[in-house]
């Protein structure tokens, strides 16, 4: 899974093996071996990959899938990869088995009062479903107040979010292509 996730992140960012190797101070051959699962990067290397791709280091640590036929297909509730911490106001769980497909699905839990203060613009199409709580999202300068059962979608537009409620807001988020 680590190899395919690193490859998917590189491709999602439009980078070549040579560009990654240069930025990491490694050889193209080594990066290629990591992407094919032939070399295991050290913890320091994983930190460098995380910094380069702008993802949390925890993304690279997955839980074992005890049933072989479920590997890459099923993610059990107790085996999700967690991204972020409660201190940041946002905890996300990767619902997709890996980052190798054409989209990723994430369960995002926004703490009361949490907000993204600066707009973000990604070269993606994104959609979300509010499973619980109150969630506000600004898309291209327009704020939308959403509640349980509401949903949204946007493509390549600046956005930011906030949870104005007193309870956590849970949003199921779909992003294409995968960016985590």
Image: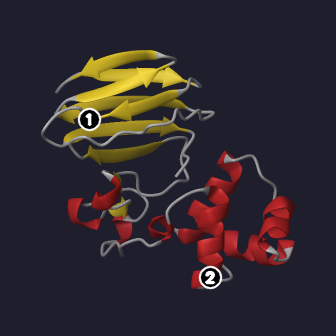
Q: CA distance from mark 1 to mark 2?
A: 35 Å
Residue that carries the numbered disc 1 in the rendered image = 163
Q: Position of residue 65 (x, y in %)?
A: 34, 72
Left/right of residue 165 with respect to residue 16 in the rendered view: left
The residue lying furthest to the top in this view is 142
Relative depth, front residue between 81 and 116: 116
Q: Earlier in the sequence, mark 1 or mark 2?
A: 2
Residue that carries the numbered disc 2 in the rendered image = 44
* Res 110 quadrant in image: top left
Left/right of residue 110 with respect to residue 160 in the rendered view: left
Residue in the image at 24% along x and 31% along y: 130
Nearer the viewer's eye, disc 1 or disc 2?
1
Q: Is residue 97 above or below residue 48?
A: above
**Disc 1 packing (10 Å; few <14; some 14–19; many ≥20):** many
Residue in the image at 53% along x and 47% along y: 101
Q: Position of residue 69 (x, y in %)?
A: 36, 66
Residue in the image at 84% along x and 60% along y: 19
Q: Is residue 107 visible?
A: yes
Relative depth, front residue between 154 and 86: 86
Q: Position of residue 164 (x, y in %)?
A: 23, 32
**Disc 2 packing (10 Å; few <14; some 14–19; many ≥20):** few
Find numbered disc 1 in the image and state the secondary structure of the residue it sits on: loop
Find numbered disc 2 in the image and state the secondary structure of the residue it sits on: helix
């Amino acid at each position: 899974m680590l190899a395919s996730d690193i490859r998917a992140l590189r491709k999602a960012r439009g980078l070549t093996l040579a560009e990654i190797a240069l930025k990491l101070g490694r050889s193209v051959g080594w990066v290629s071996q990591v992407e094919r699962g032939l070399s295991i990067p050290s913890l320091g290397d994983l930190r460098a990959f995380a910094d380069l791709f702008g993802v949390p280091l925890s993304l690279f640590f997955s839980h074992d899938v005890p049933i072989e036929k479920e590997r890459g297909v099923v993610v059990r509730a107790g085996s999700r990869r967690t991204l972020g911490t409660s201190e940041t106001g946002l905890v996300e769980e990767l619902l997709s088995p890996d980052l190798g497909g054409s989209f990723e699905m994430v369960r995002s839990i926004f703490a009361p009062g949490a907000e993204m203060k600066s707009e973000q613009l990604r070269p993606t199409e994104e959609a979300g479903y509010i499973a619980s709580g109150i969630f506000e999202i600004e898309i291209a300068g327009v704020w939308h107040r959403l509640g349980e059962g509401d949903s949204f979608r946007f493509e390549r537009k600046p956005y930011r979010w906030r949870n104005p409620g007193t309870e956590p807001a849970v949003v199921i988020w779909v992003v294409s292509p995968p960016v985590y």
